Image (cartoon, coloured by chain):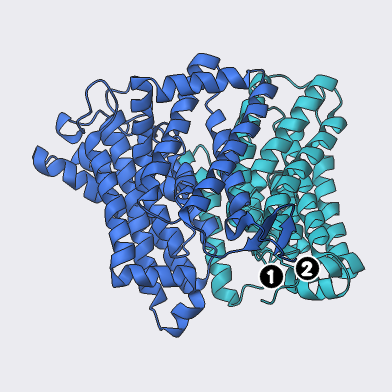
Amino acid sequence: MEDLVWTTLIRALAFGTPILLAGLGEIFAERSGVVNLGVEGMMALGALAAFAVAQSTGLPLLGLAAAVLAGAVAAALFAVAAVSLRANQYVAGLALTMLGLGLAGLLGKPFEGAPLAHTLSETSLMALALLLALALWFVLRHTYWGLVLRSAGENPETVDAMGINVFSVRYAAVVFGGAMAGLAGAFLSLAYRPSWADGITSGLGWIAVALAIFASWHPLRAVVAALFFGALYHLSYRLQAQVTPELLKAMPYLFVVLVLSLSALGRGPSGAPEALGTPYERGERR
Amino acid sequence: MRRLGPFVIEKDLVAPPARVLAVSTLALLLAFAAAGVIFWAYGVSPWLAYKTIVAETLFSKSGFAEAVRRAIPLLLAGVGLVLAFRGQFWNIGAEGQLLLGAVAASGVALFVHAPAAVELPLMFAAGFLAGGLWAALPAVLKLRLGVNDVLTTLMLNYVAAYLVGWLIHGPWRGKSAFGFAYSDRFPAGATLPLVPGTYVHWPTLLLALLAALLVWLALERTPWGYRVRVIGDNPEAARYAHIPLFGVVFAAALVSGGLAGLAGVGEVAGVHHRLLDAYQISLGYGYTAIIVAWLARGNPLGAILTALFMGVIFASGDVMKLALQMPFRVTDVFNGLILFFLISSERLLYYRVRLAQSGEEE
């Protein structure tokens, strides 16, 4: 019995790790006031970059670095549109998801089904994700930079008045979010699967976006939420023989809808950053 | 206002059609240039790629028919999204609503045996209803509880795809489908006529054009449409004017989902004649419809043009797959880039450039 609980917990954490990594990144971006719906696309690009580099050099850690870079570059492109050019953040994020999935599918064609000689250990990445959650919570809650980041999302005028460039803060947060989504992708293609296939992310990026909301933009609550989703995935895997697999596969997505609704019911005002989704313009009255 | 050589750049919040056209064209050209770089990275000459695309879609009869065929679901779903976006309902779920329409139509085709004159209208009605209901849940959640509509509509796309998967692997699996997962063929009375030699199911095309016209009329010429526009353009004013937000936006959401549902009916009744895998019914039409709507800048009639344009993009995906051995994913690259440049160029709409008058100061 104890064994069963233990394995369930470990597997839930394994399933939950990519959601947690990407979700933590999204929490940072959103705390600075920017919604990036491109997580799914950045994750796919990260997964491909990691696999391509690890496969051709034989160095999985280099692959990990490539994934972080790929996610960060994709997020920087998004930031140009959404922060500098003040484009609609939702639509710009959707465009990034389309582009990321398309580009990864296109450029990844030669790597489909290719073997990977050296993989990364699932456990160490899981531990990394948990440590990152703790570290990010500390940064966000207890440091000056965390305060600046949160203020950029709550009341950007104040940050501006402090003489800090709101755009730089938001760029940094968005690019960091992209790097985390890339890392999540690398977890999939270097440790969890470990292989590359078009569609490897299968909606996990979207669940990461939802995770930011369930967790009320709080890094430690994100761990709990990721475990919960990981457990759901694991359950659907375990019950495959008994219940229709399609129903089980649909469950995490249904749960997103359900949990979003329940948390909206319970909370009233959502606790979202005040300026979330609003592009910042200098020197203009609201 | 800013001087730039002999020109003056100044703010102008009302964008005339010519400027909208110019900015949109610029965005599209940039998107094609960026896509060219990606083709080059993939090892395909961009020049060859675009030459092939233009020759095989715009200047080939069968290629152009393919583009029109793809434009049908894009127009239906796109018109619906124009309406939804105008009312600030961020419906990203047209893909799922389309699939639900396909499911409902298949249900009628397979299990309800009505006279031919009733069967097809019944399928379209069922598809409209199913698509509308699939959009209704996120709309209620948004309007009553403030739940993020982008996420809920999107999640329901995945649920819809698995629903289709369950049906074709389970209860609706065809007796004639040896080992394959799809339903039985629809009886002849439940299939749509085609323009000979093409896959253009013209009744759905007519329906789509009619839908564009009706939605335009509803938006521009009825009190309800006026309310939708006020809610979209100035939610604050809508609140002061006591416009019933729930009723107005809920109706827009229903129609939006319903039109996507009709697109699904057209695909199964016009092209496939059976229910099959979600990824075969729709090649992501519901997502591309977002671009159709955005490119149309909130005008349902404009969507006729933009749907055709995106239909050409889809058709070029086929061309590139066959002629250049590139995966069909290339259409997603096009889609992403087009949307990206389009949205990024939006600011330019609100500036105008003119020659400086003599003696004009900064």
Q: Amino acid at mark 2?
A: Ala
| Badge 1 vs badge 2, beta-carbon distance below 8 Å | yes
Nearer to the camera, A121 or B304: B304
Mark 2: which secondary structure? helix
Quadrant (top left/top right/bottom left/bottom right) for the C terminus of chain A: bottom right
Q: Viewer-proximal residue, A126 or B201?
A: B201
Taking the spot 85% from the left edge, 70% from the top edge, the residue there is A147
Is A75 on the left-hand or right-hand side of B52?
A: right
Instruction: State the image quarter where residue B339 is shown.
Output: top right
Q: Which numbered dot is residue A275?
A: 1
Residue A64 occupies quadrant? top right
Residue A254 appears in the figure: yes
Q: Which mark is residue A132?
A: none
State whether residue A190 is above or below residue A78.
Answer: above
What residue do we see at 54% from left, 73% from top? Answer: A265
Camera-nearest residue between A168 and B97: A168
Query: Which sits in the foreground, B212 or B290?
Result: B212
Q: Colour of chain A?
A: cyan
- Percent of width and height locating residue A258: 52, 61
Q: Is residue B178 left or right of residue A75?
A: left
Mark 2 neighbour class, 10 Å CA radius: few under 14, some 14 to 19, many 20 or more: many
Question: Chain B takes which shade in the image?
Answer: blue
Residue at (35% x, 70% y) in the render = B226
Residue identifier under label 2 = A152
Helix, strand or loop at disc 1? loop
Amino acid type of the residue tagged 1 in the rendering: Ala
Image location (x, y in percent) of residue A89: 63, 57
Residue A223 higher or lower than B144, as above or below: above
Q: Position of residue A42 (x, y in %)?
A: 69, 42
